[in-house]
Amino acid sequence: MSIQAINVRNQFRGKVKEIIRGDVVSEIDVETPWGIVTSVITTRSVDDLHLVIGSEVVALVKSTEVSIAKL
């Protein structure tokens, strides 16, 4: 998968450091060179993206929302 274009300026490349799974939503901690970025996303998205500890991702930050894209 490659991201061709996205309208989010604040992008932080990193690796998944911790996943706290819930029934509906999960907390993803991403370790970046600038510190930890935390995202709360659906547990279904965690499974669909096959996120595990060490996965390379991009945290996409817009206002109070943090999205995750797997690299």
Image: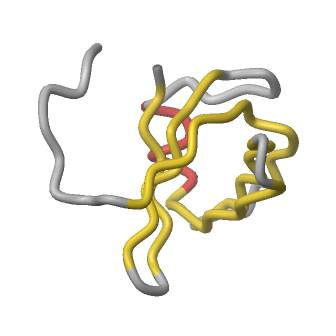
- Relative side of 62 to 35, left or right: left
Image colouring: secondary structure
Nearest the camera: 16 or 52?
16
Residue at left 26%, top 17%? 2
Q: How many marks?
A: 0
Q: Position of residue 44 (x, y in %)?
A: 48, 47
Q: Looking at the image, is 39 positioned above or below residue 65?
A: above
Kindly indicate the quadrant of the structure image that contains residue 26.
bottom right
Q: Quadrant of residue 4?
A: top left
Which residue corresponds to the image point at 50% horizontal and 60% vertical from the top-left?
42
Q: Residue furthest top?
A: 1
Near-viewer residue (15 or 34): 34
Q: Position of residue 46 (x, y in %)?
A: 56, 41
- Which sits in the foreground, 38 or 61? 61
Residue 9, image x and y in percent? 32, 59
Considering only vertical position in the picture, is 40 above or below 35?
A: below
Q: Quadrant of the N terminus?
A: top left
Residue 17: image quadrant is top right
Rendered residue at 17%/47% (across/down): 6
Q: Residue at x 42, y 38 (%)?
A: 69
- Is 9 situated left or right of 55 in this image? left
Residue 57 % position (x, y) = 56, 32
